[in-house]
Image (cartoon, coloured by chain):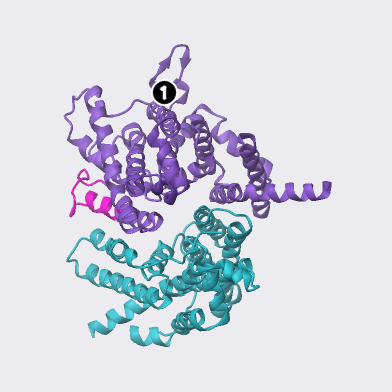
Amino acid sequence: MKTRRLAHRILALALAAIVFDLVVLAWGETPHAIARQILSGTWGTPYGIGQVLFKSTSILVAAVAARVALRAGLFHIGVDGSIAIAAISVGAVGALLPTGIPAREAFPILFVVAAAAGAAWSLPVGILRARFGAHEVISGIMLNNVAVALVGWLLSPTGGKLAEHASVHTHALPAGATLPRLERLHFFQLDLRALHGSAANLALFAALALAFGWSWFARRTVRGRELAAVGASPTASNAAGIRVGRRFVEALVLSGAVAGLCALNDVMGYKGYAEEGVSAGVGFTGIAAAILAGESALGLIVASLWFGTLSQGGLSINARVPMEIVDVLDASLILLVAVSPAITHAIESRAARRAA
Amino acid sequence: MRFVALFAQTLRIAMPYLAAAMGGVWSERSGVVNVALEGTMLVGALGAVAGTIATHSPWVGLLVAIVAGVVLQCVHGIAVLFGRANAIVSGIALNLFAAGGTRFLLRALYDSASNSPAIPALTSSSGHSPLASALLDPATWIVLVLVAATIVGLRSTPFGLRVRAAGEHPEALASAGVSIFTTRWLAVVVAGGCAGIGGAWLAFDQHQFSSGMSNGRGFIALAAVIVGGWRPGRAAAFCVVFGFAEALQIALQDRHLVAHQIVQMVPYLATLIALAGLVGRTRAPSALGKR
């Protein structure tokens, strides 16, 4: 079963590569050269690697968030809204912390703020789904739009007044509330100074822990199994005595809480303050990664690295081919993975007929 | 007079919602979940602009918009009906495809990352009042005919009956000797044409294509379908309500009574409230999203 799922993904990847090649050829470039440029712009230099790791960190957190909801059969499109609200909350609360605050105090506070803000923002989606049967995709999209407007209002000088005077971002976090960049670290013999200039930071390890933690929770705990049961069949779960509506709310709120942790990477690790659109679009990419990844931590990590690589790689080819080609490639891949079981099934049944 | 202007504005804003929502009704009543309306509007808008610029005829542009919408929805149909893909996954992928693909084409065709050159409307209506120009615009009438055709077509034509059967009792349809696949397929194609027209309306209204210009309208149209209980007349009514909410937003913005970011939330909050208040009282087609 596992090898079969892998085969589906390889088939989808091969077909998506053909789509990519055709688009590049239509633009008048050679696919080989463009693919090489994507690789050299990402995994070719220490800075590129650092940037890929930085982008993949937020994507991984968002992917875990989306996965939490997917486990219960829900498409939590609202992760982007939770991320935006968590980012502005961390920025606002972080700026209030005293300048000399040590990391061991600042970090837990902001961690809780990020998770709580993300969770709170996804609560309406959960209630609308569980109580009113409103589809989470629609309510999630609406709340994302509300979040964008709300963040804009909170930062505006006539609204929430959170922005520093004559700027578009919040006051800077105190040093103790920021996460150090990887370039400043030494692991035994490993010298990471080469990553200089890239935004990769300690949140990377938090994201990895989150992926493994979720994978363990989903597979090894009763609650995780129940979520899967609810996702597979709400009616059967209801008959088995699982409170389906409550599980829906829990899954969406937990998903929002996880999504909020993107603020660790983007606000505490990279910017050091919150601003409009600080992690814009990360949630959507995370959902795409979660769809491709399946349930394992490794799958989530690989899918996040893939999207991180392409989003950084898109920048490196933009002068030759519009970077939107990366979106086209990603979209083709998601679609092809979704239909690949049917394709392999068709191929197999044709082969079986021929053999008969 | 101010009331008339508000009415004209409501009409203008509601048009793309109406077209896309009618597409959503056809698709979802046949049993195919359609979150790809958003991307379909986007390719329709670019199609309208590209066709108009290439041939100097907005009517050709409208045709290209319909074709572009149909093609995108055909992919949705292939993925969902033949490829057995989850319809929401397919919709998410196609929306991403449309967002990236239209920006890519924008650079390919017009060497711009943000917007196309200007195009004329279907007919020039300068010098008229807003209401008169809206009523004189053939695009308005195309959309209104689309709404009427959906209401009547779904209720009283053989095709409408088949679409409803495909969404409610597919087995009954199959045992009557009608292909479920073909029926749903045709419904999705119709949805593509409708949403394509909705996108074209946006492009003609703003006299250009700009990247991401559908700006969530496809989703609001789908929300209108849902809160309208999948009935075309009610869905259309909700589109007009959303249009009114937005028109009110623009009117309030001009008067600086409330911060524009707060006003900006109005249509989305209205949708959320409508979802909370009305969804429980409606019933989805029983085979929606099922194979």
Q: Tell me which chain appears purple.
A: A
Figure check: B231 above or below A84: below
Chain B: its colour in the image is cyan
Q: Does the image show residue A165?
A: yes
Figure check: A345 above or below B218: above
Residue stretch in magenta: A147-167
Q: Residues within 10 Å of mark 1 (few under 14, many from 20)?
A: many
Query: Which of the image's four quarters has the C terminus of chain B?
Result: bottom right
Q: Whole-percent x and y of residue B284?
A: 43, 65
Residue name at image x 59 percent, y 33 percent: A40
Q: Whole-percent x and y of residue B169?
A: 53, 68
Nearer to the camera, B30 or A20: B30
For residue B230, which quarter of the picture? bottom left
Residue name at image x 60 percent, y 35 percent: A2
Q: Which residue is mark 1?
A: A183
Identity, as a three-letter code, of the amino acid under mark 1: Glu
Q: Whole-percent x and y of residue A248?
A: 36, 47
Q: Secondary structure at mark 1?
A: helix
Q: Chain of mark 1?
A: A
Query: Which of the image's four quarters has the N terminus of chain B?
Result: bottom left
Nearer to the camera, A164 or B248: B248
